[in-house]
Image (tube, grey):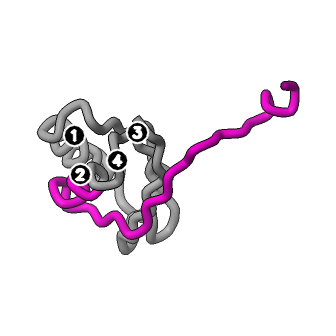
């Protein structure tokens, strides 16, 4: 599986209530269940009018399938081939 960052433009997502975000997460999880093990949601960052979501997926088409199934846009999809963090400086 490859790691991807998905940028989603969703007006006022940053102002959504906890209940609204719970519903959105539920819609995403339902789509994941239907698609199966070819995709996994890691986590998302919510900021202003966007979410930045980290997924593991077989390929970019699987990300598009999730977007269609969940009803959430996948405006920009970027593969993340490498991760660096503070531990990287110690290698």
How far is the residue under mark 2 from the one under mark 4?
A: 11 Å
Q: CA distance from mark 2 to mark 1?
A: 7 Å
Q: Residue at x 19, y 54 (%)?
A: 70
Picture disc at residue 73: none
Residue 35 in which image quadrant: top left
Q: Is residue 38 left or right of residue 89?
A: left
* C-alpha distance separating marks 1 and 3: 11 Å
Please name which of the two marks, 1 or 4, marks the residue nearer to the observer. Answer: 4
Look at 12% across and 39% down and name the residue there. Answer: 34
Q: Position of residue 10 (x, y in %)?
A: 36, 69
Q: Nearer the viewer, mark 1 or mark 3?
A: 3
**Residue under label 4:** 59
Q: With 72 as the anchor, is 78 left or right in this view?
A: right
**1 or 4: tag closer to the N-terminus:** 1
The numbered mark, 2 or 1, whose residue comes first in the sequence reads 1
- Residue, disc 3: 56
Which residue is the site of mark 2?
A: 66
Say if mark 1 contacts mark 4, CB within 8 Å.
no
- Residue 50 lies, with reference to residue 85, above or below; the image says below
Q: Nearer the viewer, residue 22 or 7?
A: 7
Q: Tag 4, which secondary structure?
A: loop
User: Which secondary structure lies at badge 2?
Assistant: helix
Image location of residue 29, percent across then percent down: 23, 40
Locate the C terminus by quadrant: top right
Pointers 2 and 3 in contact (CB under 8 A)?
no
In the picture as drawn, the residue positioned furthest to the right comes out as 90
Do the numbered discs 2 and 1 sit on residues whose CB atoms are within 8 Å? yes
Residue occupying image coordinates x 79% and y 32%: 88
Per the image, label 3 sits on a secondary structure element best described as strand
| Magenta-drawn segment | 64-91
The residue carrying mark 1 is 32
In depth, the one of 77 and 29 nearer the eye is 77
């Amino acid at each position: 599986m490859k790691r991807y960052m998905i940028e989603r433009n969703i007006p006022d997502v940053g102002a959504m209530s906890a209940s609204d975000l719970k519903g959105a997460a539920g819609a995403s999880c339902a789509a994941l269940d239907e698609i199966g093990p070819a995709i996994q949601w890691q986590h998302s960052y919510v900021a202003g009018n966007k979410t930045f979501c980290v997924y593991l997926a077989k390929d970019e088409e699987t990300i598009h399938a999730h977007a269609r199934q969940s009803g959430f846009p996948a405006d920009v999809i970027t593969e993340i081939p490498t991760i660096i963090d503070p531990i990287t400086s110690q290698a």
